[in-house]
Image: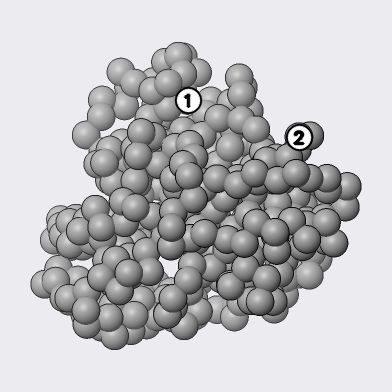
Amino acid sequence: MGDANTYAGTMPVRAEHRIDAHALLAWMQANVPGFEGPLSIDQFKGGQSNPTYRLRTPSRIYVLRRKPPGVLLKGAHAIEREARVMQALAQVGYPVPRVHGLCTDESVLGSWFFVMDMVEGRIFWDASFCDVPREDRAQYMNAMNATLAALHRVDYQAIGLSDYGRPGGYIKRQIDRWTRQYLDDELAGRHPSMDKLIEWLPAHLPDTESVALTHGDFRADNMIFHPTEPRVLAVLDWELSTLGDPLADFAYHAMMFRMPPDILGGIAGLDLQAAGLPDESAYVQAYCERTERTSIPNLDFYIVFNMFRFAAILHGIKGRVLRGTAANANAEDMGNRFARVADIAWSQVTSL
């Protein structure tokens, strides 16, 4: 992840993800106000979990996200949650694409899907922001920080999301969920570091937990920035969003400081000062100031927890590759990285 050559841009629709263009055209005409064909379809190279398509018409461009074909793990690929949370956040001006409609009738394309506007701008595939001048990079980091802090300050009840998750107990439920998925997917195998994390994490849960609307996968390449300004125009990929612990959500984002460049576009090992980037301490402090906190005492736990969760996600991708249901041609490489992430997570524990 974080490789622009691998994941940026579009390609012809993969054979296993073909959709009925005539059926989609009819659905668009019936459900998208102002839609006018003809319609051309290609597929984004990214969209690791859910196949994602670019829909072009003579006057507009849309994006379609769908559940992948085949047997799916329970609760995974929740594109209906993505559509719902973006529609809710649009009410308060949070930067999300406009969603035009959700289709839960599998007879149309073979799986559930939704259609949203295509937001034009820049996507950065790692958190170093090396494609912008050094003097501007800290501003891009600051924009990410401010956007996540703003999400955690949203009144989720006021925008109709009081039932979007179970308040409280988020960390324990997540550990249980990803442990269960890891253990149940025997085809993808086991790894010693992962097994150690499964024992360590429940024994070190924080004493307190707050609740907010969380993204679950907040990183540089899930944002669209203004073409020329350090400003976030849209936050994408809300599949893992829920009502959860905002500190865990922030720690997933801050994990970039401890991940290498070839995993999640991390910046571990970079000379941050030379690159014009803030260090982890300054970044954490900026978030705390925006959310009226003095510190994050359990930051190391939250980061280890997120590394574990990410390793479990990669483990699931490996399983989908082996079952032939992976959404991305490069999923095999991603799946093979799960053991490496688990090792990095366990090394964080041993260094505490």
User: Residue 347's quadrant in the figure?
Assistant: bottom left
Q: Mark 1 points at which residue?
A: 138
From the viewer's perspective, is residue 128 above or below residue 54?
Answer: above
Q: Mark 2 points at which residue?
A: 58
Look at the image and tell me whether residue 228 can be seen: yes
Identity of the residue drawn at 70% across and 45% down: 39
User: Residue 282's quadrant in the figure?
Assistant: top left
Q: Label 2's element? A: loop
Look at the image and tell me whether residue 284 can be seen: no
Frontmost residue, 159 versus 75 = 75
Q: Where is residue 210 in the image (x, y as percent from the top left)?
A: 56, 68
From the viewer's perspective, is residue 217 above or below residue 168?
Answer: above
Identity of the residue drawn at 50% across and 18% down: 136
Identity of the residue drawn at 20% across and 58% down: 336
Left/right placement of residue 52 relative to residue 27 reads left
Point out the tag, 2 or 1, that comes first from the N-terminus.
Answer: 2
Q: Quadrant of the C terminus?
A: bottom left
Q: Where is residue 193 in the image (x, y as percent from the top left)?
A: 14, 68
Q: Label 1's element? A: helix
Residue type pointed to by label 2: Pro
